[in-house]
Amino acid sequence: MKNLFLLPLFLLLHTALVATPAPDFTVTTSDGQVRKLYQDYVNQQKVMVLEIFFTTCPPCASHAPYLQSLYTSMQAAYPGEVEFMLLSIMQADTDPVVNAYLSAKGLTMPAAGSTGGSIAAVQPYLSGMFGPYQGTPTFVVIAPGTGEVYYDIRGNSPQQTMALLSQQIADLLPQEQDCSLKSYYDNPIDSVQISVETAGGGFSTSFWASGTYSLSAIPELQNASYSITPIKNSDPLSGLSTFDLVKIASHILGLQPFANPWQAIAADMNCSGTVTTFDIVEGRKVILGINNGFPGCGNATWKFVSDTMGMASNGACFDFRGVKIGDITGSYFAPDDIDDRDRSPMWCRNQWLSEGQAYSLPVFPGREIQLVGLQLALGIDPAALRITGIRSDVLPGFDESAYNIDRQDSKAFVPLSWIGAGAPVDLTPGEPLFFVEMVALKNVFLADVLDLDPALKAEAYGRAGERLPLELRWSEMPFQGLKNCSITPNPAIGRFFVSLEAEREGGVLLQLLDMQGKMVLADKRYLVDGPNRLEIIPGDVPPGLYTLKIDGLSAGKVVLEK
């Protein structure tokens, strides 16, 4: 009787311990693809990582760059065995809204919004079926084959959450390779060339690996000793910015020493074994496009460190940690996600440029700041403008080494990188940050031929370590009135002239409108202080009565004839 009583209790406990598999779902992602959880992923022995989110969720936005970095790493480490998907909980997140979010955040994994069935797909995870729902973002990992759910994987920071997700994926997808290629953030490193050479040079081989590798299947390495050399060359500018140079300077001056030993490895950009101001010089040459690598390091862009010293033997291998040279902040694996609303303006005055004339353009900061560093690239129309120099009266040590004027010949932009010599510079909006010296190659408005080039992220660095993304804005004082306007001849055939007096110089917009208010001609012109006579050629405008406006102010009516 005692055993019969315990049997139902045992069955009850056994049932409770069996994991509940993920409910199946079918969604249409924002790129128009129909995707089924079990048919396309679980039954194909793929790990599925879900992020439950919505597009205006601030924590989701802060997690986005780290999630994209993890996604890239996992796809490289486990090709064809893992997929990520975003599922929105909001009715307002239609396909266009979701696509705009993916584009703005640089996300490349599939995502589904309300129009694709995301709300029904996420409902089981919001209902308490797998545990308490704590809000977005919630990450769910679904096991291959079984559909077992690992619910709400959550750390104390985005980086910690990504590390926990990475570990869960690794637990579900054990690899045959037995040695790792990782960063100091534990991100798998892709596209690494492994070079192996036996002692004495009797045998050598090389192959490509991502995240992990093994040497056990190479028979020539049995009963032999050999060296292992990982090699990775990527864009030397990836993960490197003037902010890293600011960090190196703070370390050298003892203001803020490096918190992690690997930062000293990344900072040694001339591979001298020490961190000095020469490393800052090498980093700035890469940022300015003077060097396309790090010559002191054999133009390598990565360093690899193993905990095991010496030679390997008998098919064994070593774990390696990879460091991107110059990347002190770790942004290669965790790129910054900066909200456009936080951008700080740099103000310039738009003006008319006359062919062959030289100009000096003051650039003003848009806010008060204690500045310790700055980088940007001034993009130009090379057919209309040439920059001859950049100078600053307020930035200590700013000279020709802070920019590369020759870059405009091949890339149509001039990169600029400056860091302070220790003490921050107090800037106010009324004092020019720097002056751009230039020569006009044709008659043109300055704002049409000068802007910030995205080749180099435009940002300033404050004393407290804040990073301010920059944008260029143009100012023009609107004309308040027009004096002594006259149009001749009137009626006109083919062309006419407008004469007027201006109280100041500056650019204006000419518009010709028909009697229904439709604009038939628009042109930018430049007025000098005092009398002006502007020639206007209407072109194919039909005959009739028209109104001429200058900066929105009526300058009179004109009759056009054929």
Image: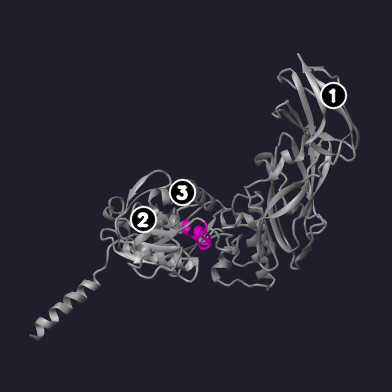
> What residue does disc 2 label?
120
Closer to the camera in the image, 453 or 42: 42
| x, y percent for residue 420 | 74, 63
* Residue extending farthest front: 516
Q: In the structure shown, which secondary structural element does the residue marked by tag 2 occupy?
A: helix
Q: Amino acid at mark 3?
A: Thr
Q: Quadrant of the C terminus?
A: top right
Q: Earlier in the sequence, mark 2 or mark 1?
A: 2
Closer to the camera in the image, 451 or 19: 19
- Examine the rendered structure and indicate whether residue 518 appears above or below residue 156: above
Other-residue count near label 3 (Cα within 10 Å), few / some / many at <14 / 14–19 / ≥20: some
Q: Amino acid at mark 1?
A: Phe
Q: Main secondary structure of the magenta part?
A: helix
Closer to the camera in the image, 559 or 220: 559
Q: Please give the name of the residue rendered at 84% of the width and 19% of the height, measured from the top-left corner.
A: 490
| Foreground disc of the pair 2, 1 | 2
- Examine the rendered structure and indicate whether residue 368 appears above or below residue 549: below
| Magenta-highlighted residues | 56-69
Q: How is the image coloured?
A: one colour
> What residue does disc 3 label?
94
Q: Quadrant of the N terminus?
A: bottom left
| x, y percent for residue 208 | 40, 52
| Foreground disc of the pair 3, 1 | 3
In 3D space, how far apart are the residues under numbered discs 2 and 1 (Cα atoms)? Answer: 67 Å
Q: CB under 8 Å between callouts 2 and 3?
A: no
| x, y percent for residue 104 | 54, 51
Note whether residue 145 is visible: yes
